[in-house]
Amino acid sequence: MKSETGPDLLSKDYLLGRFLDYVQIATRSDPDSPGIPSTPGQWDLLNRLVEDLKAIGVEDVTLTENGYVLARIPASPGGSGKTRLGFFAHVDTAPDLPSAANPIVHRNYDGGVIRLPDDPDQVLDPSAVPCLADKVGEDIITASGTTLLGADDKSGLAVLMAVIEALGRDSVIEHGPLVFCFNPDEEIARGMKGIEIEDIGADFGYTLDGELPGEIDAESFSADEAILEITGVAAHPGWAKDKMVNALRIAGRFLKQLPLEMSPERTDGREGFIHPNQVTGTADRAEVRMIIRDYELDGLEAKRQIVRELVAQLQQEEPRAELNLVINKQYRNMRYWLEEDTRPVDYALEAVRAVGLEPKLKIIRGGTDGSNLTERGLPTPNIFCGFHEVHSQREWVSLQDMVKSAETVLQVIQIWAVRG
Ligand SMILES: [Zn+2]
């Protein structure tokens, strides 16, 4: 690399300031809302990001009607590097808990137990959280006990803002054309539904939405959803003998026969699962919704087949009922595309090494915005941004890890500029 990306290049104070501001804005997404974005608070943060980008001199900033901030930075003078890179972070927080955190900075962490003041049951104990035990001397940020911190993914936002700020300040950093995209509703799987790949204008992308320092994710699940509709035969319960067919009882038999060893509660690593996640209905009609996950397409098909066969068997056992199974594709493992051109992942691993961390190539037991982007033609692995225990009141992040994440992004940008 021509330039040095030491810690002094990035403004730690700028990064921390942005982070503390963003986590106080309520951006919890809502799967039951048809709104785009699903909640109005997300507009507050999107507008704030536009203001912040303008304040640090980014000229080409747009906020789309679907709630996507796009900040474009032209290639550095000299024009080295033609590859257009996109970086993504999401503004929403998980629907599980309230957002709008009251953040607490535990400066120069002493290695002790951290008690969150607003709920005495919420305790971060380094003996139970090994990652935390490694953070003595760092600045740990938590919420106060009743909300999410929202480091997922506001650490990604703050990291990228610090990168943009450094690029604007430092003319030594060589880079090709860059686009930074801040999007809504990742947590409810709509993160990339409101934008076209052509409108992003990138050849390769990275999401900043990962956990451990040094972690690069290049695999996600392949995912389908299955919906089983059961129509029974209605009758007055007092005179139902030999007439009624109870849809709820058929739903119960179906659930009982789903293989328990293929459930999320019994699987990990590279194992997939079939997971019933919603049952609704009456004696007349019932609906069982489930999600099916695997890392391989044949594994996914085998699980679909288990569901199909079970439905066929129940239909045979109870011909008076009507069983209707629909399986919808959700997303596919990004590895299928990322292994065709390994540069995005290789360069990210190289960047991690360059900032002095041990690279960890991990698989996500879920999906990311990158799964969707990759499948649609924009290869997008995921880079760590340092958050921990997300989707809980104990969510925390270390400022030093966020700085490492920003340094990694600056390295990636420079590696692409040189190698293209
Ligand atoms: Zn996230």
Image (cartoon, grey):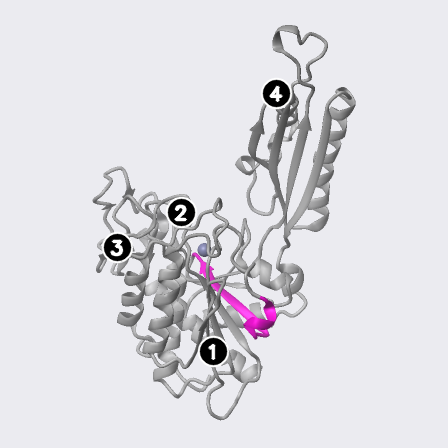
Please name the residue that numbered disc 4 is placed on. 283
**Which numbered disc, 1 or 4, marks the residue that appears first in the sequence?**
1
Name the residue: 68% across, 14% down: 244
Question: Going by the image, does 118 lie left or right of 379?
Answer: left
Q: Secondary structure at mark 4?
A: loop
Please name the residue that numbered disc 3 is placed on. 103
Please name the residue that numbered disc 2 is placed on. 391
Name the residue: 65% across, 37% down: 227
The answer to which of 66 and 185 lies nearer the viewer is 66
How far apart, in angstroms, are the residues tagged by discs 3 and 4?
A: 49 Å
**Which numbered disc, 4 or 2, marks the residue that appears first in the sequence?**
4
Against 253, residue 169 (above or below) is below
| Mark 4 Cα-neighbour bin, 10 Å: few <14, some 14–19, many ≥20 | some
Please name the residue that numbered disc 1 is placed on. 72
Question: Going by the image, does 322 lie left or right of 213?
Answer: right
Q: Secondary structure at mark 2?
A: loop
| Mark 3 Cα-neighbour bin, 10 Å: few <14, some 14–19, many ≥20 | many
- The amino acid at mark 2 is His
What is the residue that sits farthest to the front in this orientation?
A: 236
- Is label 3 in contact with label 1 (beta carbons under 8 Å)? no
- The amino acid at mark 4 is Ala
How far apart, in angstroms, are the residues tagged by discs 4 and 2?
A: 36 Å
Find residue 14 and report its horizontal and vertical position in percent: 29, 71
Q: Is residue 408 magenta?
A: no
Region in magenta: 196-211
Find residue 18 and report its horizontal and vertical position in percent: 31, 66
Q: Kindly report which numbered mark, 3 or 4, lies closer to the viewer in this rendering.
A: 4
